Amino acid sequence: MNEISEILPTDLRPWALFLDIDGTLIDIAETPDRVFVPCELPEQLAELSSRLEGALALVSGRSIESIDKLFDPYQFPAAGLHGTEIRSRGNGEIDRGILDEWRLDGARQELNDLARNWPGMIVEDKGIAIAVHYRQAPEAFSQVDARIGTLLGQIGSGWVRQDGKMVVEIHPGESNKGTAAAKLMNVTPFSGRIPIAIGDDLTDERMFEYVNKAGGRSIKVGTSTDASLARFQVDSARTIRHWISQLAYSRN
């Protein structure tokens, strides 16, 4: 593994920064609503964003509403629900794709019925996406796997499956973190910069792919030896937070 100083730059002037949240900025929790955001982190991100002239975006499977609650009172540029929602400027308007959410109604019912048979399983209804978290019921994966496959066949075109760490999600097929980063890189304040993407999960691979093609830097967080398109790796979200803290308080 490269030295941390060779992976995480100390001079951010030429860069645009794309940050996953869960597992990258904050540690993964048993359930999405139990995550802990260190009290100093939102302010540090705000300082970093200022140094980047706003070219810092949070890219997540969470909705932008959920992202804003985590980092209150700050509202950063963001891509929520794997890029289905885009906000190119902090405190700006959210661009949402027009989708037939009603097509997920049957899936909502079936997945909630399945969850009743597995204590600890959580069905997270995101409106235009549905995520099934089985971290607390890992033995349920085979049934989740089969049910998601069946439901995608019933829902029809326009929706895809996204696997992550102990979670499977159905979300719009045209959206992913790679297309989200590409859209943001086409607008101010991101355009003309070099992208850095930092993430920890399968959901971040499309973002890594885009950044690599754009001549940027892709960084995976964690000690996993699984194959990844990321060209660099750091050990933990704690390391990312330490880097952000150093940059936020640096006089350079």
Image (cartoon, grey):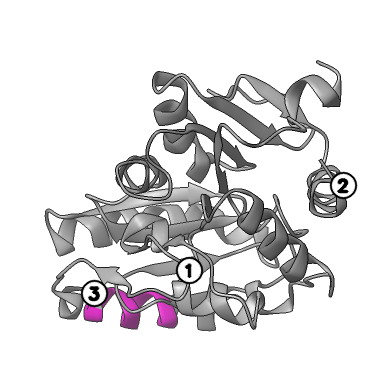
Q: Residues within 10 Å of mark 3 (few under 14, many from 20)?
A: many
Residue 190 in view, yes or no = yes
Q: Which residues are magenta?
A: 105-113
Q: Are marks 1 and 2 in contact (CB under 8 Å)?
A: no
Query: Which one is earlier in the sequence, the residue at label 2 or at label 3?
Result: 3
Residue at the (46%, 29%) spot, across then down: 211
Image coordinates for residue 61, horizontal then vertical, percent: 48, 60
Give residue 104's mark. Answer: 3
User: Spatial distance from mark 2 to mark 3, Cα to Cα?
Assistant: 44 Å
Q: In the structure shown, which secondary structural element does the residue marked by tag 2 occupy?
A: helix
Residue at the (61%, 42%) spot, across then down: 199
User: Spatial distance from mark 1 to mark 3, Cα to Cα?
Assistant: 30 Å
Residue at the (61%, 50%) spot, across then down: 165
Image coordinates for residue 233, horizontal then vertical, percent: 73, 27
- Answer left or right for 88 relative to 103: right
Residue at the (84%, 70%) spot, across then down: 40
Q: Is residue 216 magenta?
A: no
